[in-house]
Amino acid sequence: MLKHNDSATELLTILQEECAEVIQEASKVKRFGQNAENLDRLAKEIGDLVCMIQLVQDWQLVAPSDIETNSAAKKEKLKVWSNLFEDTHD
């Protein structure tokens, strides 16, 4: 469990920043197209976010099993409420 200290604050702050950067790059892909440069920037930011998610788990702020459970639940909701699973993607 995280203690309220400078390291915990830093972890959560960087997590927030990475979430915002993914949002920004996803918006740019929508606005300016799916060209290689935009997709590379999006991939970089998603990689940075995955790193922070892993650190959140390492610091035991959130259990990996809780993330898996909630991820599976989200996927089931998307199957009902979105068109993302109508086509097969490899």
Image (cartoon, rainbow, N blue to C red):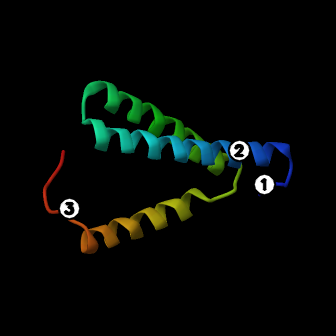
The mark nearer the N terminus, 2 or 3, is 2
Neighbour class for label 1 at 10 Å: few (<14), some, many (≥20)? Answer: few
Neighbour class for label 3 at 10 Å: few (<14), some, many (≥20)? Answer: few
Q: Position of residue 72 (x, y in %)?
A: 39, 65
Q: Secondary structure at mark 2?
A: helix
Which residue reaches farthest right?
5
The mark nearer the N terminus, 1 or 2, is 1
Task: Find the distance from the CA under tag 1 to the CA under tag 2.
Answer: 10 Å
Mark 1 — residue? 2
Which of the 4 image quarters holds residue 65? Answer: bottom right
Q: Position of residue 90 (x, y in %)?
A: 18, 45
Q: Secondary structure at mark 3?
A: loop
Mark 2 — residue? 11
Looking at numbered disc 1 in the image, what kind of residue is underneath it? Leu
Mark 3 — residue? 85
Q: Secondary structure at mark 1?
A: loop
Q: Position of residue 50 (x, y in %)?
A: 51, 42
Q: Residue at x 56, y 42 (%)?
A: 18
Mark 1 and 2 residues: CB-CB less than 8 Å, in contact?
yes
Mark 2 and 3 residues: CB-CB less than 8 Å, in contact?
no
Q: Position of residue 16 (x, y in %)?
A: 61, 48
For the image, the number of numbered tags is 3
Given residues 44 and 63, the one toward you in this image is: 44
Looking at numbered disc 3 in the image, what kind of residue is underneath it? Phe
The mark nearer the N terminus, 1 or 3, is 1
Q: Residue at x 13, y 57 (%)?
A: 87
Mark 1 and 3 residues: CB-CB less than 8 Å, in contact?
no
Above or below residue 19? Residue 62 is below
Above or below residue 5? Residue 48 is above
Which of the 4 image quarters holds residue 54? Answer: top right
